[in-house]
Amino acid sequence: MILASLISLVISFLAVYMYTNTTEEIVKVVTVGIALISLFLSFIFAPWSIVLLLVVSLVIVPSSWLNY
């Protein structure tokens, strides 16, 4: 399952790269859709420990940003 997660994450990064390096509007819309779907799939395929680590970091980090 980790291989599927990594493949999906690489596809997402490639879509973001294409988004930043193109001027065509339809290509930008399609690449954003591909990036979002691939990112969602990479979270589904990721092991639960990695997902738990991401969720905990998202809960802790915003609370530390509010204390500045």
Image (cartoon, grey):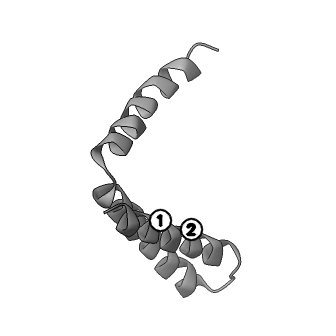
Taking depth in this image into account, of 17 and 42 the one nearest to the observer is: 42
From the top left corner, tell me how far across and down residue 41 is, in percent: 33, 64
Residue 58, quarter of the rendered image? top left
In the rendered view, tell whether residue 9 sits above or below residue 55.
Answer: below
From the top left corner, tell me how far across and down residue 65 is, in percent: 57, 22
Q: Residue furthest top?
A: 67
Residue 55, quarter of the rendered image? top left
Could you tell me how far apart the alpha carbons at marks 1 and 2 are, in whole angstroms? 6 Å
SS at badge 2: helix
**Figure label count:** 2
Q: The disc labelled 2 sits on which kind of residue?
A: Phe
Q: On the image, numbered disc 1 is attached to which residue?
A: 9
Taking depth in this image into account, of 3 and 59 the one nearest to the observer is: 3
Q: Is residue 46 left or right of residue 26?
A: left
Is the residue marked by circle 1 packed among few (<14), some (14-19), or many (20+) residues within 10 Å? Answer: many
Residue 54 tag number:
none
Is the residue marked by circle 2 packed among few (<14), some (14-19), or many (20+) residues within 10 Å? Answer: some
Q: On the image, numbered disc 2 is attached to which residue?
A: 13
Which residue is located at x 58 percent, y 83 percent?
Answer: 25
From the top left corner, tell me how far across and down residue 50 is, in percent: 38, 44
Q: The disc labelled 1 sits on which kind of residue?
A: Leu
Q: Is residue 16 visible?
A: yes
Q: Is residue 9 left or right of residue 45?
A: right
From the top left corner, tell me how far across and down residue 30 is, in percent: 47, 81
Q: Are marks 1 and 2 in contact (CB under 8 Å)?
A: yes
Which residue is located at x 65 percent, y 15 percent?
Answer: 68
